[in-house]
Image (spheres, grey):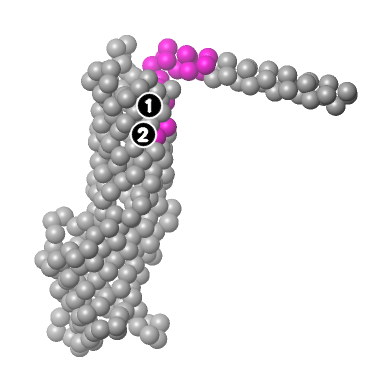
Amino acid sequence: MKKLRYILFFAIFAWCIATTAQEDTNQGIRWSSLHGLEYEMKAGLGIGGMSPLPLPHEIRSIDHYSPGLNFLIEGNAVKWMDISKQWGVKVGLRLENKSMNTSAKVKNYGMKILNDNGGQLSGLWTGGVKTKVHNSYITFPVSLAYCLNRRWDFSLGIYFSYLLSGDFSGDVYDGHLRTPDETGSRVDFQGSNRATYDFSGDLRKFQWGWQVEAEWKAFRHLNVLGDLTWGMNNIFKSDFKTVAFNLYPIYLNFGFGYSF
């Protein structure tokens, strides 16, 4: 009997705490609404890759491309600047992956490969190249938001990303390496004879770029959205000269959001 009283007491106590928390949450949402603030959580998938612009003459053909699984989760807040809630400023925090797998035929492509002795050979590669990229970032987007009507919102702004973990590696096959330049000695790799490379340690920690987003309110709290992010600086460090051209992360993302 005493145990039953304790159970009832704790159940009533937990119910009171939950009710109070819900009331506080509702009061917080009402306060935010009165002060022109809105919040949103969203999740989605992205498709894209690390691309040179324009395609350099060293890359003769793209034989295979796979975007990988690019997840993102983001929380953001919007401060509307007018009573009609048409213009506002949106800030957020996003965790995301940017990955891809490619195979290409190249000619005189800057390369630094690992040999069987654990050393490196640097030079210009002609032949096949397989590349695997899997980078994780924490990103801070800042945008100007525009509400077109009850259903559609748009935003345009910039983002700043910090690299949490990075992998840019692969192998070369069916070709030859001229070292140290196109007139140097030749090393052939044919058939099952391959060599690997790893540029992960040369990835830049900080990146920035532009983003544009469109959001459709499917229901009162559920939104469907899409955004394009376009990196503006090279994914590699400025002192990395092996790859002679810049690579920019360009990704198109789709997902769902819950606003409150």
Mark 1 vs mark 2: which is more N-terminal? 1
The quadrant where residue 178 appears: bottom left
- Residue displayed at 35% across by 83% down: 115
- The quadrant of the image that shows the C terminus is top left
Q: CA distance from mark 1 to mark 2?
A: 7 Å
Question: What residue type is disc 1 on?
Answer: Leu
Magenta part of the chain: 26-42
- Residue displayed at 26% across by 31% down: 214
The quadrant where residue 103 appears: bottom left
Residue 218 location (% of width, % of height): 32, 25
Q: In this picture, is 225 found above or below 133?
A: above
Q: In this picture, is 236 found above or below 12?
A: below
The quadrant where residue 204 appears: bottom left
Q: Which mark is residue 113?
A: none
The residue tagged 2 is: 256
In the foreground, 71 or 165: 71
Residue 201 location (% of width, % of height): 38, 65
Evaluate if marks 1 and 2 touch, with contact meaning CB atoms under 8 Å apart. yes
Residue 151 location (% of width, % of height): 27, 21
**Residue 222 in the figure: left or right of residue 27:** left
Q: Could you tell me which secondary element the residue under label 2 belongs to?
A: strand
Question: What residue type is disc 2 on?
Answer: Phe
**Residue 212 in the figure: left or right of residue 94:** left
The residue tagged 1 is: 222
Residue 185 location (% of width, % of height): 20, 88
In the foreground, 102 or 138: 102
